[in-house]
Amino acid sequence: MPPESSPHDLASYWMPFTANRQFKEAPRLLVAAKDMHYTADDGRQILDGTAGLWCVNAGHCRDEIIAAVTRQMHVMDYAPSFQMGHPLAFEAAARVAELMPSGLDRIFFTNSGSESVDSALKIALAYHRARGEGQRTRFIGRERGYHGVGFGGISVGGMSANRKAFSANLMPGTDHLPHTLSIEHAAFSRGQPQWGAHLADDLERLVALHDASTIAAVIVEPLAGSAGVLVPPAGYLERLRELCTRHGLLLIFDEVITGFGRLGAATASEYFGVTPDFITLAKGINNAAIPMGAVAVKREIHDAVVGAAMTGAIEFMHGYTYSAHPAAAAAAIAAIDLYRRERLFDRARELAPYWEQAVHGLADAPHVKDIRNLGLVAGIELEPRAGQPGKRAYEAFGKCFEQGVMIRYTGDILAFSPPLIIQPAQIDHIFDTVRTVLREVA
Ligand SMILES: Cc1ncc(COP(=O)(O)O)c(C=O)c1O
């Protein structure tokens, strides 16, 4: 007989994106959450500076969402979405569509950001094929892009650590634009850097190399989060849109973190005034209460794919068992209602100047090499410790947690993305703690 499992046995769970051996020697365990705080297993309150993983936009354990999910679980726990449906799926899709830029009102549900990205890539291929341009199979991503962990997502993604172990198996026919970060030209930019719009012109080079007729779509995060908060230079996204339109390439904005208010508007597309052909979503869609993601698709693209099939035939051979899960759909409707009722996207916009001032107050703190921000997102890039890349940021992350503040780090960059309900005093507390910690780390 195997030994009885106990909550203190940490061996069985192979943790994702985690240094498992190191973690299990000194675990950081969270056991409860409410509004802006987690509770650690030793009873300490931890201020959430990252909205979980950029996803709990309305704060934790909101009563309205809990009630909606609980009600739904009593009524109907699960319903298949293949050749069947349930009312909340349609209602949730309509609610999501209302928040998207005009024209992107066809919603395909998934369960995560990675699935949303792979679904969008497949819809792009289906669209070109439906129009008799099936030779458009190539995808253009961007260096330092993060599009989740599916084979499609890592192929168009540009984070080498996520690609190298799988390099022989990446999707053929992908290429990459250069990333937009330049500490040399734009260090300590407040909001969008003024330098770098011309980097979008590299798409012309890729079009000249591959020919537009072979390219299906370009995918970028309007603001890259996971690779360390890369804010798009002023004019960059506009130029990318213009070039995609000129060459007949579809443009996908991966808004898994920027969707649902992070920048102070429902989407980054709305914030920047640039409308792509697809928006990939997840995270804030239902305040992370139940796994859910979605792709918002331009109506003409949907109509072309659906219209190309014979009546009675399944038009798009793709979907997930849990697409539009009833509990996730109930949570999405409740979360979107909550965002609206509490005007949380406006609140993010109103707080953004205070947030910017607070984070840039750390410009003179030890080890700081660059500070970047937009909406309620910020990144502080540290000088790496000689011969130990990422170590200093990891230690800062660990010490912040010990001192009751949850932040994230990637490489030598500290990242911040709190719930949109954060109070100014809590913003001060986060950055005061970071300042103290930066004095402590060598
Ligand atoms: C821009 C972007 N795309 C995709 C993903 C992947 O989402 P998930 O972890 O839900 O698969 C993430 C996750 O952080 C993301 O930031």
Image: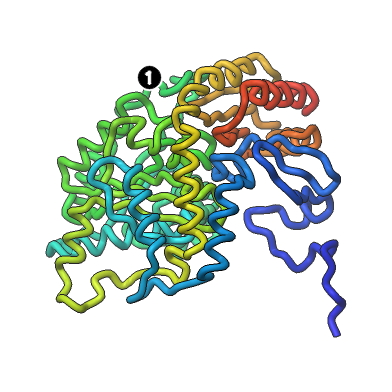
Q: Vertically, is 136 above or below 246?
A: below
Residue 3 occupies quadrant = bottom right
Q: Vertically, is 164 above or below 323?
A: above
Residue at coordinates 15% horizontally, 68% vertically from top-left?
A: 308
**In this rendering, position of residue 236 left or right of residue 51:** left
**In this rendering, position of residue 137 left or right of residue 395:** left
Counting from the top left corner in percent of width and height, residue 305 is at 20, 64
Name the one closer to the observer, 181 or 78.
78
Q: Which residue lies furthest to the left in this view?
A: 132
Name the one closer to the observer, 263 or 124.
263
Q: Which colour scheme is used?
A: rainbow
Residue 303 occupies quadrant = bottom left
Residue at coordinates 21% horizontally, 78% vertically from top-left?
A: 313
For label 1, the crowd category at 10 Å Cα-Cα, with few meaning under 14, some 14 to 19 and many 20 or more, is some
Residue at coordinates 26% horizontally, 61% vertically from top-left?
A: 125
Counting from the top left corner in percent of width and height, residue 172 is at 35, 62
Residue 138 visible in rendering: yes
| Disc 1 target residue | 194
Q: Residue furthest bottom?
A: 1
**In this rendering, position of residue 177 left or right of residue 440:** left
Kindly state the secondary structure of the residue where label 1 is placed.
loop
For the C terminus, give its image quadrant.
top right
For the N terminus, give its image quadrant.
bottom right
Residue 222 occupies quadrant = top left
Name the one closer to the observer, 255 or 18.
255
**In this rendering, position of residue 436 left or right of residue 364:** right
Amino acid, disc 1:
Gln
Counting from the top left corner in percent of width and height, residue 278 is at 30, 49
Residue at coordinates 24% horizontally, 37% vertically from top-left?
A: 241
